[in-house]
Image (cartoon, rainbow, N blue to C red):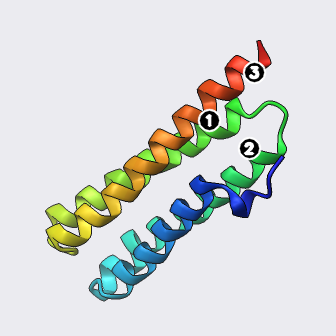
Amino acid sequence: MALHTDLTIHKTAYDLFDAIMDLAKNMPRDFKALIGAELRKECIAILVLIFRANCARDKDKHILSLIERLQVAELLLRLSRDKRLISTGQYAKVIQLTSSIGKQANGWRKYSNSSAS
């Protein structure tokens, strides 16, 4: 078992967290407190779930939770773009990261389920 910090999915999730921190600091105050804080919370939860899945024998429940949190983050990012809190370029950058995390998580889930069989 590799350290969770060495996993590609963890590195991508950390890049997402870093990008979200930059996006949130430039939001208007009322949206920063609401949407920005929620995005940061979701990113931290995603990083924690990667750690939990890496340590657990039954990875499936943690990976499913990770995917759910990722979908919430994507929804908040879409709302941020629709409300013009972030630019289209910023949105494209973070959605590329969320898409990569989602693909890696689903691949990890398939691999862990096939290994368990």
Is 10 situated above or below 60?
below
Give the mark, 1 or 3, whose residue is nearer the N terminus.
Answer: 1
Amino acid at dot 2? Ala
Q: Are marks 1 and 2 in contact (CB under 8 Å)?
A: yes
Give the mark, 3 or 2, whose residue is nearer the N terminus.
Answer: 2
Q: For the residue carrying disc 2, how many other residues have a C-alpha within 10 Å: few (<14), some (14-19), or many (20+)?
A: many
- Cα separation between marks 3 and 2: 14 Å
Q: Secondary structure at mark 1?
A: helix
Q: Are marks 1 and 3 in contact (CB under 8 Å)?
A: no
Number of callouts = 3
- Cα separation between marks 1 and 2: 10 Å
At which x and y percent is residue 1? Answer: 84, 46
At which x and y percent is residue 75? Answer: 33, 51
Amino acid at dot 3? Ser
Residue 108: image tag: 1
- Cα separation between marks 1 and 3: 10 Å
- To which residue does mark 3 refer? 115
- 15 left or right, relative to 23: right
Decide which of 30, 12 is in the foreground and name it: 12
